[in-house]
């Protein structure tokens, strides 16, 4: 006879079996805003299909399997031959194959591709963020490779392919290929000009032999990598294939895999080059300027990835509170919990709105949009990625003790949340990049002011924030010590301007009051009275 204590009550149903894209009103609105009308029907179909897959029980299970069975390193085969391979759980390959198949590396190959891909990347991050790394680097390699027309013509069709082939063989014999990147070294970190890896020219024009060590190389089973090394004329960018054209393996020695806080499904390795064959990309001594296009694109993906993680956390929190009862009613209806949820929802929507606007700038490609990206990408990367961790932690707390249990999925989001702030240039690097753009590229500031200026007069708190920012910019003496403050203000003002122009009034009002007007505390759940919090929470609620 079953015990009466085994009845399960007051627990929410699993947040599964729904369209992750269609349930995200802010994301849908951004796509409809930035895509040309003739592209919308096709994009809706693609993104809804991806959203339904992302919300399925099957992919949820694959994500758990990929994280519970992290990759393992095999340096040698059974006979003692050096093979330097990483073995992944089959779920990793299934997820990565679906990401490639959904066009998450194909932005450069179709109209409106960056907005469509950005929306898909936000959705896909909510399934499993680890496989976003090879997807991001493959997508981002394209602008760097365009420094060499021959390399771009050879590799771009493979990188923008929707076919995933995991086998190790020459890329010329594959319908699709993935790219990685190796920039940092243990003695320099973000100071890549201190790199010690050397590049010795070979007899064939444009080919070199690399010797050195890379401290971080993510997705080491990719088909090729962009790396930096010191050539005779200075720091230079190189393409390093994993397998050479004759079928032999390039010297690509995996010393160890990193044991990371989160991102457990994805392999990050230390790599040694010792007579490694490489092809130069761009001119000698122009390594940083050549690879900077890749860096900028991966930084935008850090913004999009953080937006996806925040959306996933907020969706779980709102869903839980919509079903969980306490103290005589649903948690969703309790004024204090509603304040917390609304505050979290504002952060997630502001991140999504900003990320999609920057993706649209890539699609536009005009001079003004390129200038806007120069200052807005590092500011957004700085701020949005830093907001991700407090959002996911607070969202986990909304589930109470359940949110601290692995089965809820919230601990995986919490562990993943700091990653985008650290990778691709940590906070100080981004803040200093904003400062560098201000000093060297006046057109970047002009483009930014034109963008936020489109919202002037619509909200007095936004107007005051723009004025305060201009006052702060009038004196850049000693600005390095306050570069973080400047980056934060650039991001918040741009988010506020976009929300005032495009979001529902209740969202824009609450954001401007709390983020620009200063009428909020240091923790989430301290929004001021007089705001329509119910409408904000309802907008963020995923409906099954």
Image (tube, helix red, strand yellow):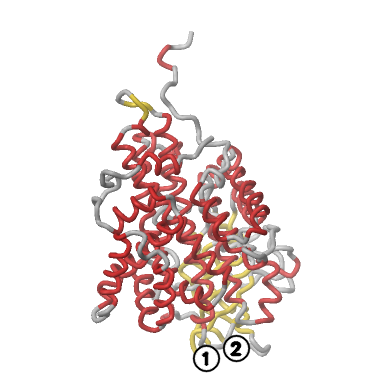
Q: In the displayed image of the protein, which residue is found farthest to the front?
A: 457
Residue 205: horizontal and vertical position, in percent? 66, 89
Residue 366, relative to residue 345: is it above or below? below
Residue 542: horizontal and vertical position, in percent? 49, 39
Residue 228, relative to residue 1: is it above or below? below
Task: Identify the secondary structure beneath mark 2.
Answer: strand
Location of the C terminus by quadrant is top right
Work out how far the residue at label 2 is from the one at label 1, CA to CA, in angstroms.
8 Å
Task: Identify the secondary structure beneath mark 1.
Answer: loop
Labels 2 & 1 near each other (Cβ < 8 A): yes
Kindly identify which numbered label has been placed on residue 491. Answer: none
Residue found 66% across the figure and 90% down from its top? 203
Kindly identify which numbered label has been placed on residue 201. Answer: 2
Q: Decide if residue 399 is on the left or right side of residue 238.
A: left
Q: Decide if residue 142 is on the left or right side of residue 537.
A: right
Residue neighbourhood size for the residue with mark 2, other residues' Cα within 10 Å, grouped as few (<14), some (14–19), many (≥20): some
Residue 263: horizontal and vertical position, in percent? 47, 53
Q: In terms of sequence position, does the residue under pointer 2 or pointer 1 come before the other?
A: 2
Residue found 64% across the figure and 55% down from its top? 40
Task: Examine the rendering and report whether any part of residue 416 can be seen.
Answer: no
Of residues 385 and 246, the one nearer the viewer is 385
Residue matched to label 1 = 232
Q: Decide if residue 151 is on the left or right side of residue 70.
A: right
Q: In the displayed image of the protein, which residue is found farthest to the top?
A: 1
Residue 324: horizontal and vertical position, in percent? 39, 29
Q: How many marks?
A: 2
Of residues 480 and 359, the one nearer the viewer is 359
Residue 205, relative to residue 249: is it above or below? below
């Amino acid at each position: 006879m079953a015990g009466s204590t085994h009845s399960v009550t007051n627990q929410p149903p699993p947040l599964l079996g729904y369209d992750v894209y269609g349930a995200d009103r802010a994301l849908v609105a951004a796509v409809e805003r930035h895509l040309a009308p003739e592209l919308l029907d096709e994009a809706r179909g693609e993104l809804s299909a991806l959203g339904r897959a992302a919300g399925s029980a099957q992919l949820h299970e694959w994500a758990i399997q990929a994280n519970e069975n992290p990759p393992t390193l095999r340096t040698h085969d059974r006979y003692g031959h050096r093979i330097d391979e990483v073995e992944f759980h089959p779920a990793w390959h299934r997820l990565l194959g679906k990401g490639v198949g959904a066009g998450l590396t194909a932005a450069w190959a179709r109209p409106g591709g960056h907005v469509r891909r950005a929306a898909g990347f936000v959705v896909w991050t909510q399934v499993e963020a680890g496989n976003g790394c090879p997807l991001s680097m493959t997508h981002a390699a394209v602008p760097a490779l365009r420094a060499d027309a021959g390399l771009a013509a050879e590799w771009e069709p493979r990188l923008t392919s929707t076919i995933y082939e995991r086998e190790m063989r020459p890329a010329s014999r594959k319908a699709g290929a993935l790219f990685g990147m190796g920039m940092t070294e243990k003695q320099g970190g973000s100071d890549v000009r201190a790199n010690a890896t050397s590049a010795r020219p070979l007899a064939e024009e444009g080919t070199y032999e690399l010797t050195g060590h890379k401290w971080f190389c993510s997705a080491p089973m990719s088909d090729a990598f962009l790396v930096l090394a010191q050539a005779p004329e200075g720091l230079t960018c190189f393409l390093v294939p994993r397998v050479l054209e004759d079928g032999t393996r390039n010297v690509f020695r995996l010393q160890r895999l990193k044991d990371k806080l989160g991102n457990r499904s994805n392999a990050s390795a230390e790599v040694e080059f010792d007579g490694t064959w490489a092809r130069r990309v761009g001119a000698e001594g122009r390594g940083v300027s050549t690879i900077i296009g890749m860096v900028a694109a991966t930084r935008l993906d850090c913004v999009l990835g953080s937006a996806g993680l925040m959306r996933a956390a907020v969706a779980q929190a709102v869903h839980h509170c919509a079903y969980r009862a306490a103290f005589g009613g649903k948690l969703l209806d309790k004024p204090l919990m509603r304040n917390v949820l609304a505050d979290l929802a504002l952060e997630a929507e502001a991140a999504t709105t900003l990320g999609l606007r920057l993706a649209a700038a890539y699609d536009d490609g005009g001079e003004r949009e390129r200038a806007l990206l120069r200052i807005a990408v590092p500011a957004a990367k700085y701020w949005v990625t830093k907001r991700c961790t407090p959002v996911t932690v607070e969202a986990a707390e909304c589930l109470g003790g359940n949110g601290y249990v692995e089965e809820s999925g919230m601990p995986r989001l919490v562990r993943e949340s700091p990653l985008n702030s650290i990778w691709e240039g940590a906070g100080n690097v981004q803040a200093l990049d904003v400062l560098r753009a201000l000093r060297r590229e006046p057109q970047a500031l002009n483009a930014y002011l034109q963008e936020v200026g489109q919202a002037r007069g619509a909200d007095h708190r936004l107007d005051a924030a723009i004025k305060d920012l201009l006052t702060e910019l009038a004196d850049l003496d000693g600005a390095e010590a306050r570069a973080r403050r400047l980056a934060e203000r650039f991001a918040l003002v741009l988010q506020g301007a976009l929300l005032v122009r495009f979001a529902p009034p209740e969202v824009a009002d609450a954001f401007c009051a709390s983020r620009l007007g200063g009428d909020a505390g240091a923790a989430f759940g301290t929004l001021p009275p007089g705001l329509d919090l119910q409408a904000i929470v309802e907008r963020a609620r995923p409906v099954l």
